[in-house]
Image: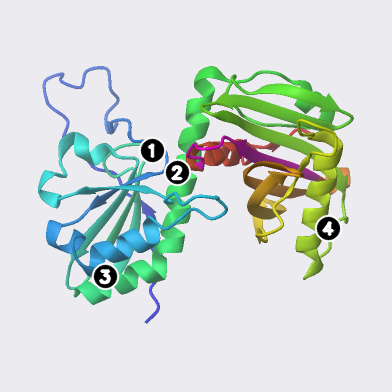
C-alpha cells in the first residue's frame, strides 16, 4: 500500500519560565537552539539491537551508499548512531536526524525544526523490522533530497560569513552566485569565467559559459551533445601542462544525466568524471545547463574538483550549493 510522506512544520514547545525568566521576549515567542553538525552528516536515532541487525544494514545500504560520480567510494552521508535513551538535550541539535521506531503503524513523517533550527527530522515507524526496512526502501530518495537541500541552505548561511562581493560576473552575464570570498576569478575570456579555490591537495573550480538556447537536443542525442560541449570548452579554455593537453570528459564512464529545476528554470544536470587528455589527472564534476529563455540562451555552470588522493564529496557538494544559489538579475 502506497504511503505518502507527510511534510509539515513541527516545533518543540518550550514552557516559558515565569517571573521574568524570558524578559525581553514577546509573548508566544519560541526559542530553538542553532542546529549543529558537519555538512553531509546524518544522526540516526535507533536502538542498538536494530542498528546491529537488518534495519541498520538497510539504513547503511541506502543512506551511506556511494556518492554518484566520484572516482572513489564516499558515502552520501556520514552516519552517527544515537540510542534513543541518550537522545536528549544537545544531542537533539543535529541538523539532519533520522529516527527509527517500532510502532503499531507503518509510516514516514518529515518534520522541520523539531528540536533546533534549521533542522529536518525524519521519523520512520513500522510494526516489524521488515516493515521498517520496506519504509526505508520506499522513501529514502525523498528523504535524501530533503536532507541535502537542508545542507545546501546551511552552506549558503555559512558563505555569508565571508562572502565574495565581486560583481564582475553579474555585470557581464546578468546573474550572480553566492560563494565564499576564498573563490577567485582566475580566467575571464569572452563570456567564459573560471573561478578557483585552493583546497587541501588541489583546487575546487567553477566554470561558467553560455550556449545557444536550443543547442542541446532532447532524447538519446542529449548525452553526446553535453559531452561534446564540455570537451570543446575544455580544449579552448582549460589547458593542461603541455600543448595538446586539456580537460575532457572521462570516456570510460558515461555521465549520469537528469532533468531538474534550478530556481524554477528547466535544467539539465549531469554528473561524471573528467580527465586531462594525454595526462594522468582527473576527478569528478557536476554540470548544470540552465534554460534562460528571457535572454535566449543556455547558461552552463559547472563545478569540478582537482585534488588527487583527497576526499572530494564535501568539496563537490559545496560547488553544487554555489551553483544552486544562482540568481538572475536581468
The residue at which mark 2 appears reads as: 150
How packed mark 2 is, by other alpha carbons closer than 10 Å (few <14, some 14-19, many 20 or more), is: some
- Magenta residues? 299-312
Q: Quadrant of the C terminus?
A: top right
Q: Callout 3 environment at 10 Å: few (<14), some (14 to 19), or many (20+)?
A: many
Question: In which quarter of the view is residue 24 placed?
Answer: top left
Residue at figure coordinates x 80%, y 41% from the top left:
234
**Does 249 appear in magenta?**
no
Residue 147 in the image, given as x and y percentages of width and height:
42, 49
Residues at circles 2 and 1 in contact by the CB criterion of under 8 Å: yes
Q: Position of residue 143 (x, y in %)?
A: 41, 57
Secondary element type, mark 4: loop
Nearer-the-camera pick, 62 or 98: 62
Is residue 82 found left or right of 328 in the rendered image? left
- Identify the residue position indicated by label 4 in the image: 216
Q: Which residue is mark 1?
A: 118
Left or right: 41 in relation to 311 = left
Residue 132: mark in rendering: 3
Helix, strand or loop at label 2? It is: helix
Q: Earlier in the sequence, mark 2 or mark 3?
A: 3
For image coordinates 42% across by 58% down, the residue present is: 65
Give the CA distance from mark 2 to mark 4.
31 Å
Contact? badges 1 and 3 (CB < 8 Å): no
**First of labels 1, 3 by sequence position:** 1
Residue nearest the viewer, comparing 279 with 143: 279
64 left or right, relative to 293: left
Label 2 with label 3: CB-CB less than 8 Å: no
Where disc 1 sits, the SS reads loop
The mark closer to the camera, 2 or 1, is 2
CA gap, disc 1 to disc 3? 26 Å
Q: Residue at x 67, y 37 (%)?
A: 326
Residue drawn at x 12%, y 44% is 86
Amino acid at each position: 500500500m502506497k504511503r505518502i510522506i507527510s511534510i509539515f512544520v513541527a516545533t518543540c514547545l518550550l514552557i516559558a519560565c515565569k517571573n521574568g525568566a524570558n524578559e525581553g521576549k514577546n509573548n508566544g515567542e519560541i526559542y530553538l537552539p542553532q542546529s549543529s553538525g558537519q555538512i553531509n552528516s546524518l544522526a540516526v536515532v535507533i536502538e542498538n539491537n536494530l542498528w546491529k541487525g537488518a534495519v541498520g544494514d538497510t539504513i547503511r545500504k541506502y543512506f551511506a551508499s556511494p556518492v554518484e560520480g566520484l572516482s572513489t567510494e564516499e558515502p552520501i552521508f556520514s552516519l552517527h548512531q544515537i540510542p534513543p535513551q541518550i537522545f536528549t538535550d544537545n544531542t537533539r541539535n543535529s541538523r539532519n536526524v533520522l529516527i527509527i521506531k517500532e510502532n503499531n503503524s507503518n509510516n514516514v513523517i518529515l518534520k522541520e525544526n523539531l528540536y533546533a533550527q534549521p533542522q529536518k527530522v525524519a521519523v520512520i515507524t513500522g510494526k516489524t523490522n521488515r516493515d521498517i526496512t520496506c519504509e526505508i526502501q520506499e522513501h529514502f530518495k525523498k528523504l535524501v533530497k530533503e536532507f541535502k537541500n537542508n545542507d545546501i541552505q546551511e552552506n549558503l548561511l555559512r558563505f555569508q560569513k565571508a562572502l565574495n562581493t565581486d560583481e564582475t560576473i553579474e555585470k557581464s552575464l546578468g546573474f550572480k552566485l553566492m560563494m565564499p570570498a576564498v573563490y577567485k576569478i582566475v580566467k575571464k575570456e569572452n563570456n567564459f569565467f573560471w573561478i578557483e579555490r585552493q583546497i587541501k591537495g588541489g583546487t575546487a573550480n567553477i566554470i561558467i559559459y553560455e550556449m545557444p538556447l536550443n543547442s542541446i537536443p532532447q532524447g538519446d542525442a542529449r548525452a553526446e551533445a553535453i559531452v561534446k560541449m564540455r570537451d570543446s570548452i575544455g580544449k579552448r579554455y582549460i589547458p593542461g601542462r603541455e600543448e595538446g593537453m586539456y580537460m575532457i570528459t572521462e570516456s570510460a564512464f558515461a555521465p549520469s544525466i537528469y532533468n531538474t529545476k534550478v530556481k524554477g528554470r528547466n535544467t539539465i544536470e549531469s554528473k561524471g568524471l573528467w580527465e586531462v587528455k594525454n595526462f594522468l589527472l582527473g576527478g569528478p564534476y557536476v554540470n548544470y545547463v540552465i534554460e534562460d529563455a528571457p535572454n535566449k540562451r543556455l547558461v552552463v555552470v559547472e563545478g569540478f574538483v582537482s585534488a588527487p588522493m583527497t576526499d572530494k564529496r564535501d568539496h563537490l557538494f559545496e560547488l553544487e550549493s554555489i551553483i544552486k544559489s544562482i540568481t538572475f538579475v536581468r
